[in-house]
Image (spheres, grey):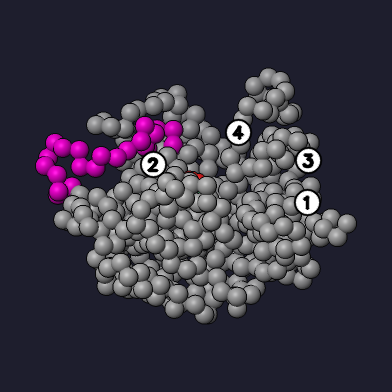
Amino acid sequence: MSSENRTSVPNSLNEHWMPFTSNKDFKANPRLITEAKGVYLKTHHGKTQIDASSGLFCNPLGHGRREITEAVTKQLETLDYAQPFQQGFGGSFELATKISKHTPGDLNKMFFTICGSTAVETAIKIAVAYHRAKGHAERFRFVGRERGYHGMNIGCISVGGMVNNIKTFASVLMPGVQHIRHTHLPEHKFVSGQPETGDYLANDLETICQNFGGENIAACIVEPIAGSTGTLVPPKGYLQKLREICDKHGILLIFDEVITGWGRTGSKFGADEFGVTPDIMTMAKATTNGVVPMGVVACSDYIYDAVMDASPTGAVELFHGYTYSGIPVAVAAALAVQDIFEKDDIFNRAKNLAPYFQKGLFSLQDLESVDNIRGYGMMGGIDMKLNTKPGKAGYECFKACYEAGVNFKATGDCLIIAPQFICEEKHIDEIIEKLRTGITNYQKNQKN
Ligand code: PLP
């Protein structure tokens, strides 16, 4: 097999330890993606599939965007790498300025990282550095939320709340982390949009403040909508309450917008959509349309200023950074993405398409094996009924849907659906129709 023609199964699958994959199952029956263009993928079986989750929420602008390819190619030809410590490259400053025009409030200072996980780790460290700079080293505690997903590094899983991601590593978690309850209540059945009930769950943060001393807590981190656990939408008023409690105790509020950022909710950021501005915000995935890894931490001016002011001129103010922080190739991709956002009016496109997608998504509720559906903007979660072992329904259903020609991510018993923003209504129809076929076939397999 030549390197340009990776369309068949390689001679050996043994040496690659695959991430978040049932390696044994996969290697017995591999699924390889060989090409991607627009909303479609091609498999090594030669079949075409529609991409119903924008990769892993990465590619809202569609696959194979010529503008991004050209920008990245040109950058590689001009400057392939520039080390980011004590020297720089103009593009990263240009990108930071562009992003600051979109971010709400005074979230005007951008720290570039490698991915979503490193953005979250960086946000945690910046929160600690800020409080130390203000003379409050006692603020080292963090509050996360059950069923939250913030990536895979030790800090990320410590504030995250997905049990399977934590169990094996419980002995090495970050100390001083408490979790508030997640926002999905039993009465939230087939709700598109924000649930009416449950804002009181934000008071869990107040309880933690009473138990541990609000003055000891550095930050509370949540996703505006929990994405990886299947679109857990905040109840009306919930995020506002979290903001109020943080303000009352001097706790920083961090929004992890790795999924909800760049239009997924129908607004640029979840913060805009729900009218709550955090102190720190993380982004990744769609920042480069998923084609080159990159994470961004947007910080409020006052956080940056406090850390700068605490150090003498000439000293490194924050002992933190990555070999690949804001490297030229990632920046080139992100700048091309910024141009497309503007040229194609992409956020309005997502907003206008969302009601059509939500209608289609909720049309699947008549299927026998569908237990619940949640949706917001251009994202949705379908919980499957447990006619198989808990935690396996999503994967089993994913396999049936893969055969039916629709590709998405499954987590536990949930199907995660997040179409690309370039979809037309006919593509949404195709996604829903193929989901219906795949889920129906899954139901039949379960009965046999
Ligand atoms: N934060 C959120 C909300 C995510 O959804 C993810 C990934 O899905 C991450 C962080 C981690 O991002 P990455 O996989 O790029 O490290």
Sequence order check: which comes first, mark 4 or mark 2? Answer: 4
Which of label 3 and label 1 is nearer to you? 1
Residue at 49 percent across and 77 percent down: it is 198
Dot 2 corresponds to which residue? 113
Q: How much space separates mark 4 and mark 2, taking CA atoms?
A: 24 Å
Question: Which of the labelled discs sits on residue 47, or is there none?
Answer: 3
Residue that label 1 marks = 400
Relative to 214, does residue 59 appear above or below in the rendering? above
- Residue 312 on the magenta span: yes
Rounded to the nearest whole Å, what is the CA distance between mark 3 and mark 4?
25 Å
Q: Is residue 126 above or below residue 68?
A: below
Q: CA distance from mark 3 to mark 2?
A: 36 Å
Q: Quadrant of the C terminus?
A: bottom right
Q: Residues in magenta? A: 308-330
Find the residue positioned furthest to the right. 448
* Pointer 3 local density, CA inside 10 Å: few below 14, some 14–19, many at least 20: some
Residue 201 versus residue 98 in the image, above or below = below
Q: Earlier in the sequence, mark 2 or mark 1?
A: 2
Dot 2 beta carbon under 8 Å from ligand 1: no
Across and down, in percent, residue 123 comes to 35, 51
Name which residue type carries label 3.
Lys
